């Protein structure tokens, strides 16, 4: 279907040119429907890959402790990158173990953090955040080395660096850990509507794409481990 769609797109461009040059009176491709491609499956990581990625940061450095806490929160909460890098101190409640996240369309949601993420954020706040800030005031939870809100580009650079350290050769995207969060929850039996709420999706159909990823993983495991797979 994708090759057909590319071919039709090229043909349509050619006929639009002929129309502009007044060499034809009617564009016959207007009667041709483009094939339905569907949404591409989001890239995800195995649980072993995620463990390796989370363990990659160098904890002897403040930036490494920040990266570890940041990746733990990203995977534990399934945040969008923009939601993660814009987190402020007042949005996190370590005692209750929740984040107050401002999502798309200024919609607020509460997301549980989980024990591992809480431990790593507490350690980062205690041992590394003040060193990163160097005395500069900031309410950003995960500031850059300049003490400012991190950019998407900086975050992407850090996750690629840690993936390289972890020996992960798979193609990644800034939202890889968000995809892993959703896929792993579904693999372990989480309800689709609960995952929808945690991800902040307004439409359940957006979340349903992850069921295809989970189903593909189940089929792969069945083929690998079942005696008649």
Image: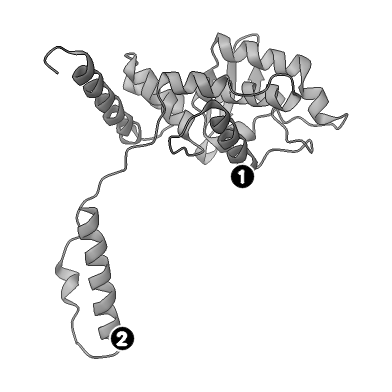
Q: Residues within 10 Å of mark 2 (few under 14, many from 20)?
A: few
Who's the residue at 44% across and 24% down the image?
Answer: 181
Q: How many marks?
A: 2
Circle 2: element type: helix
Q: Residue at x 43, y 35 (%)?
A: 170
Quadrant position of the C terminus in the picture: top left
The one nearer the camera, 156 or 112, is 156
The image position of residue 34, as x and y in percent, is 20, 59
Q: Nearer the viewer, mark 1 or mark 2?
A: 1
Mark 1 burial class by Cα count in 10 Å: few <14, some 14-19, many 20+: few
- Circle 2 is placed at which residue position? 20
Q: Which mark is residue 46?
A: none
Identify the residue at image location x=42%, y=26%: 180
* Residue 42 in view of the camera: yes
Q: Residue furthest bottom?
A: 22
- Callout 1: SS: helix
How far from the left and from the top, in percent, is residue 138?
Answer: 79, 31
Residue 132 percent location from the top left of the image: 79, 28
> Mark on residue 153?
1
Quarter of the view holding residue 171 = top left
Task: Determine the image quadrant of residue 133.
Answer: top right
Q: In this picture, is 39 found above or below 66?
A: below
Residue 164 in the image: x percent, y percent? 55, 33
Distance between the alpha carbons at the discs numbered 1 and 2: 41 Å
Of 86 and 1, the residue lying toward us: 1
């Amino acid at each position: 279907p994708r090759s057909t769609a590319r071919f039709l797109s090229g043909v349509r461009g050619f006929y639009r040119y002929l129309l502009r040059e007044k060499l034809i009176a009617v564009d016959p491709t207007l009667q041709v429907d483009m094939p339905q491609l569907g949404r591409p499956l989001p890239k995800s990581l195995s649980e072993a890959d995620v463990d390796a990625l989370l363990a990659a940061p160098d904890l002897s450095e403040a930036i490494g402790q920040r990266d570890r806490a940041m990746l733990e929160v990203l995977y534990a909460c399934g945040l969008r990158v923009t939601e993660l890098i814009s987190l402020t101190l007042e949005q996190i409640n370590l005692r209750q173990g929740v984040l107050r996240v401002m999502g798309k369309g200024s919609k607020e949601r509460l997301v549980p953090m989980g024990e591992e993420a809480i431990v790593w954020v507490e350690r980062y706040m205690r041992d590394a955040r003040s060193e990163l800030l160097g005395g500069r005031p900031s309410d950003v939870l995960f500031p850059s080395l300049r003490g400012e809100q991190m950019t998407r580009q900086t975050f992407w650079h850090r996750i690629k660096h840690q993936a390289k350290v972890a020996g992960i050769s798979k193609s990644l995207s800034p939202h890889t850990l968000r995809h892993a969060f959703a896929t792993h929850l579904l693999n372990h039996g989480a309800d689709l509507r609960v995952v929808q709420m945690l991800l902040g999706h307004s439409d359940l159909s957006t979340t349903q794409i992850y069921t295809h990823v989970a189903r593909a993983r189940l089929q792969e495991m069945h083929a690998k481990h079942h005696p008649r797979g």
